[in-house]
Image (spheres, rainbow, N blue to C red):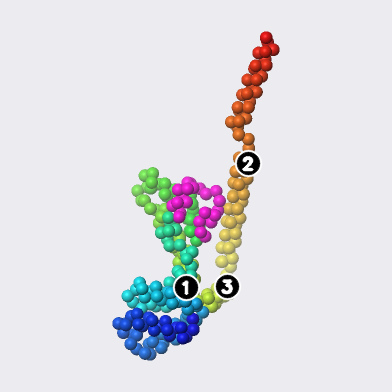
């Protein structure tokens, strides 16, 4: 967003909040233009304008930079699913697949939701869900609480990262990489091992499933044996005659 576009946007904000005292101070307005022009210099002016209009339409108070960047992150990242919708998807998955999943969780759910489910454990969520519904626990909703705690923590990190200007995000990543003591690498190694084990189990399950499909139907084999026995019995009867 250019400085000229910033001036227009600040003009819209000041007109939208005419009773805000600081907007009557020309020096404050100039400072505001300078800061906003710097912070939003790498951003698409259309998205910034959408975020400003959204804020003006829903808030009685002028926006802060963080509020606008949060709205921009929501607009630009529609795949960050709200917690209530995410939990609804998990509930439907538990209904469709009781007790356990036969494939990796991200085969069924978007990645952030799947990671939150894995953080708690699908079997754990299922056990908490069943404990309340079957009367084993007097605390209903523990499955929801456990999932939302994991999910909201993950999506908050994603949202905050999306709010950062790209150059600032790169600088933070570079400094973090330079200061790393190997902790992140260890976590990545654990994640790789986890994924490999999941793939191994999926492969075993798939092979067993295919074997079960290809295996002959035991009922048909039994019927065939019975028919042979009957035919053999008839032949013996004719021989006796």
What is the quadrant of residue 50 in the picture? bottom left
Where is residue 39? Give x, y as percent. Answer: 47, 81
Where is residue 138? Give x, y as percent. Answer: 35, 48
Label 1 secondary element: helix
Q: Decide: is 77 above or below 35.
A: above
Residue contact between numbered discs 2 and 1, judged by CB atoms under 8 Å: no
Q: Residue furthest top?
A: 241
| Front position in the image: 223 or 203 | 223
Instruction: Quickly name the residue at label 2.
Output: 211
Mark 3 vs mark 2: give the one in front.
Answer: 2
Query: How many C-alpha atoms fall within 10 Å of the one at disc 2: few (<14), some, or many (≥20)?
Result: few
- Which label number is shown at residue 177? 3
Residue 172 visible, this angle: no
Task: Name the residue: 69% across, 12% down.
Answer: 239
- Which label number is shown at residue 163? 1
Residue contact between numbered discs 3 and 2, judged by CB atoms under 8 Å: no
Q: Which residues are magenta?
A: 89-111
Q: Decide: is 41 above or below 188.
A: below
- Give left or right: position of 175 versus 143: right
Residue 218 visible, this angle: yes
In terms of sequence position, does the residue under pointer 1 or pointer 3 come before the other? 1
């Amino acid at each position: 967003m250019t400085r000229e576009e910033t001036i227009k946007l600040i003009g819209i904000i000041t007109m939208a909040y005419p009773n805000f005292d600081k907007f009557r101070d020309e020096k404050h307005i100039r400072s505001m233009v300078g800061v906003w022009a710097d912070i939003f210099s790498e951003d698409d002016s259309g998205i910034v304008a959408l975020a400003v209009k959204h804020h003006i339409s829903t808030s009685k108070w002028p926006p802060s930079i963080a509020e606008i960047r949060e709205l921009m992150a929501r607009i630009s990242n529609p795949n960050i699913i709200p917690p209530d919708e995410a939990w609804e998807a998990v509930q439907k998955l538990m209904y469709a697949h009781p007790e356990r999943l036969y494939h990796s969780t991200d085969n069924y759910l978007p990645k952030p939701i799947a990671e939150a489910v894995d953080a708690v454990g699908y079997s754990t969520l299922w056990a908490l869900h069943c404990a309340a519904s079957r009367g084993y626990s007097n605390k209903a909703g523990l499955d929801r609480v456990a999932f939302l705690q994991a999910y909201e923590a993950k999506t908050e990190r994603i949202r905050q990262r999306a709010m950062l200007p790209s150059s600032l995000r790169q600088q933070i990543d570079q400094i973090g990489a330079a200061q790393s003591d190997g902790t992140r690498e260890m976590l990545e190694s654990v994640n790789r091992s986890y994924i490999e084990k999941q793939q191994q189990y999926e492969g075993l399950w798939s092979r067993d499933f295919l074997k079960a499909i290809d295996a002959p139907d035991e009922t048909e084999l039994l019927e065939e044996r019975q028919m042979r026995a009957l035919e053999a019995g008839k032949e013996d009867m004719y021989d006796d005659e």
